[in-house]
Image (tube, helix red, strand yellow):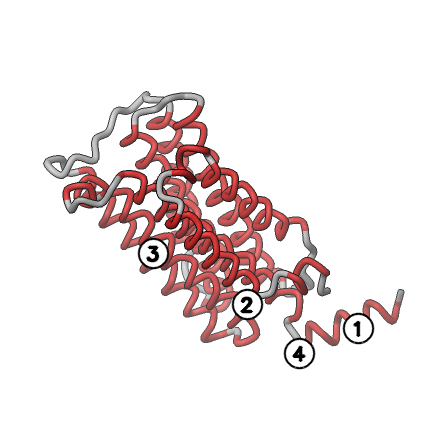
Amino acid sequence: MSTKLEEVLNYRVLLLINIAIIAVAELGGHSFEETGIIHLIAIVFVALGISRIFVHYDAYDRYLRLLIRGGSLALFVFSASHLLEFLGYVYFKVYEDAIFVSVVNFYIASMLAVTVGAEYFLHTLKKNSTAMIRILITSMIVFLSLALLIFFQKILVSLGLDTPTPYIYAILVLGVSFLSVNRLLEIKKHVSIMTGFVNYFIAAFILITVSALQYVFYEATGRMGIPDFQIIYTSHFLFYGALTLMFLAFVRLTNLGGVYKEAEEYEKNNH
């Protein structure tokens, strides 16, 4: 079920768009940050990503459907992280450490959303315990709740290098990223038809992980002489890239082929 949007915004076009944005922003110095253009571009990418949630995907396997829904939830939560950052800077004037930690919590929750779907499929395949699924769902809720509590300053945090917070979050980010990629690789091993979807999500998670670690250790980055606006730029560039990869992951679901293609043709013939 291909759409005009997918035909126009293929991976080559999106790659060129991302490269052009990076080039123009860097050549413009502070201007993208001062004028807020960096945030406006992010809204376009958010809309692009969320547009995939409202497309029907012909995955007739009810267990794979949960993985797709987990991907949709991950896309939504990841997109919401930027909205949280934007509101924190522009409207609520939240202190920077709280904004960064809240965003990282959203990043972790987005990776866990996909992991839940993947774990459910693997549980069904191997008939193992559902304990891991319950732990993942609970963890996702905890990180989302923690993000909001920190954002609204009910819990105060510091990312100073002399505090344990950045190191704890670095371990959490790397641990969740490793777990998520591991579960997706298991899906890839057992369901070859989902290879494209899985590969794009793994690439997106790598960018999310790098972005999260940049937030966590922003103080160390500043001590290296890198300007604050470059931290903002880099986080947004990684955000654009990750959303682009998620968009492309869902595009791959519109042409799964094999039995899915046969089922789609059968459905069309019946109509």
Q: Look at mark 2 in the image and give the residue it sits on.
A: 12
Label located before the other in sequence (2 or 3): 2
- Quick one: quadrant of the C terminus? bottom right
- Quick one: quadrant of the N terminus? bottom right
Asked whether residue 35 is in view, the answer is yes
Label located before the other in sequence (3 or 4): 3
Label located before the other in sequence (2 or 4): 2
Q: In this view, does 228 lie above or below 200?
A: above
Is the residue marked by circle 1 packed among few (<14), some (14-19), or many (20+) residues within 10 Å?
few
Q: Look at mark 4 in the image and give the residue it sits on.
A: 258
Residue shown at 52% from the left, 39% from the top: 40
Q: Which of 263 and 153 is in front in this view?
A: 153
Amino acid on which the number 4 mark rests in the picture: Gly
The label on residue 265 is: 1
Q: Which of marks 2 and 3 is in front?
A: 2
Mark 2–mark 4 Cα distance, whole angstroms, equals 26 Å
Residue 8 location (% of width, % of height): 66, 62
Label located before the other in sequence (1 or 3): 3
Mark 3–mark 4 Cα distance, whole angstroms, equals 31 Å
